[in-house]
Image (spheres, grey):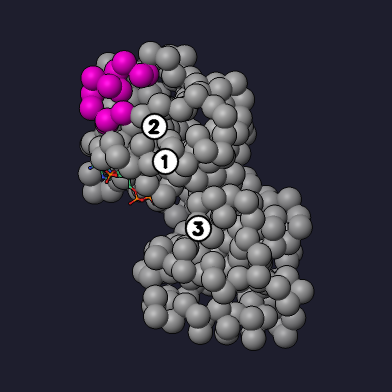
Amino acid sequence: MAISGKTRIYAVIGDPVEHSLSPVIQNAAFNALNINGVYTAFRVKSSDVATALSGIRALGVLGLNVTMPHKEAVISYLDWIDEPAKFLNSVNTIHNKDGKMLGYSTDGIGALRALRENGAAPCGKKVLILGAGGAARAIAYSLIQEADELVVLNRTVSEAEKLSEILKRKFNKKISTGSLSPEVIKEKIKNTDILLNTTSVGMTPNINQSVITPDILKTDLTVMDIVYNPCETQLIKDAKAVGARVVNGIEMLIYQGAAAFEIWTGQQAPVQVMREAILEQNVGV
Ligand code: ATR
């Protein structure tokens, strides 16, 4: 749609931000649904977060995504945040609605929807999460509400323990922790339905690396990797080779973007259009 006086602005803020794929995903969705909106990227320094958000209010920018390093800092300038954002102390989506700035965290719901839409709903399943950083926390928070059992393994075990403690305080579920060693992974994977890599292992340029040796993967496993560059990581290749169900990082990216789009527009996101737009960028090829 041609830009006019009625065009609404949306953006991602972060630092750095110029490589974000969010403009590609969201503009494709606006075009597909004939929405008069434009989505761009603003590089915002940490010292400018407060003034940037005042500007967003003043200019009536309708929707924002927030990426590193501002996901926590934006919270004090918002009027309301949702439950996941409160728990995670992290906001990745802002809706400037009727003069109020509303904050959401859509990372976890993105992972949950990516699993569901790919035939691997975590309801009643045993989930093994590798990593305990920001992404792991968001995903664990969403998945634990449906899964039967959760195991968190991390290189720094104390981080996995911290995550387990805060989850246990809120949810009455079986959660255990351990190190990311091959022996522990091998033992825990025996009792796993869904395995999620949330570490950066395998990301470009280290595309031949994987957190898991292929021999311990099994057919009756769903393997999801949140690394989307390359879109088919070594872990995903190995999982495919043993006949496991796979969900790649692009899927999480799409569904977390879809959640933001739905918050801003109230319309169902055109996920296939969003997926094709990303794949056209040749991510990780
Ligand atoms: P994100 O927001 O993407 O989750 P993060 O919060 O920096 O990023 O978390 C990165 C995760 O990847 C952590 O679990 C980290 O493990 P540590 O807590 O031990 O640092 C994990 N990670 C990063 N590089 C890794 C590597 N080479 N091997 C194993 N784990 C790694």
Q: Residue at x 76, y 55 (%)?
A: 267
Segment colored magenta = 178-189
State if disc 2 and disc 1 touch (CB < 8 Å): yes
Residue designated by label 2 = 152
Question: Which percent across, then down, holds residue 4?
Answer: 71, 83
| Precedes in sequence: disc 1 or disc 3 | 3
Could you say whether the residue bearing mark 1 is in a helix, strand or loop?
helix
What secondary structure is the magenta-colored segment mainly?
helix
Q: Is residue 179 magenta?
A: yes
- Horizontally, is 193 left or right of 7 in the view? left
Q: Residue at x 23, y 44 (%)?
A: 206
Question: Which percent across, then down, holds residue 111?
Answer: 53, 40
- From this viewpoint, is residue 57 visible? yes
- Horizontally, is 236 left or right of 138 in the view? left
Residue designated by label 3 = 90
Amino acid type at circle 1 is Leu
- Mark nearer the viewer, 1 or 3: 1
- Horizontally, is 81 left or right of 20 in the view? right
Q: Is residue 44 above or below residue 219?
A: below
Of 50 and 273, the residue lying toward us: 50
Q: Is residue 153 above or below residue 55?
A: above
Amino acid type at circle 2 is Val
Could you say whether the residue bearing mark 2 is in a helix, strand or loop?
strand
Question: Which percent across, then down, holds residue 12?
Answer: 51, 68
Crowd around label 1: few <14 · some 14–19 · many ≥20 (10 Å)? many
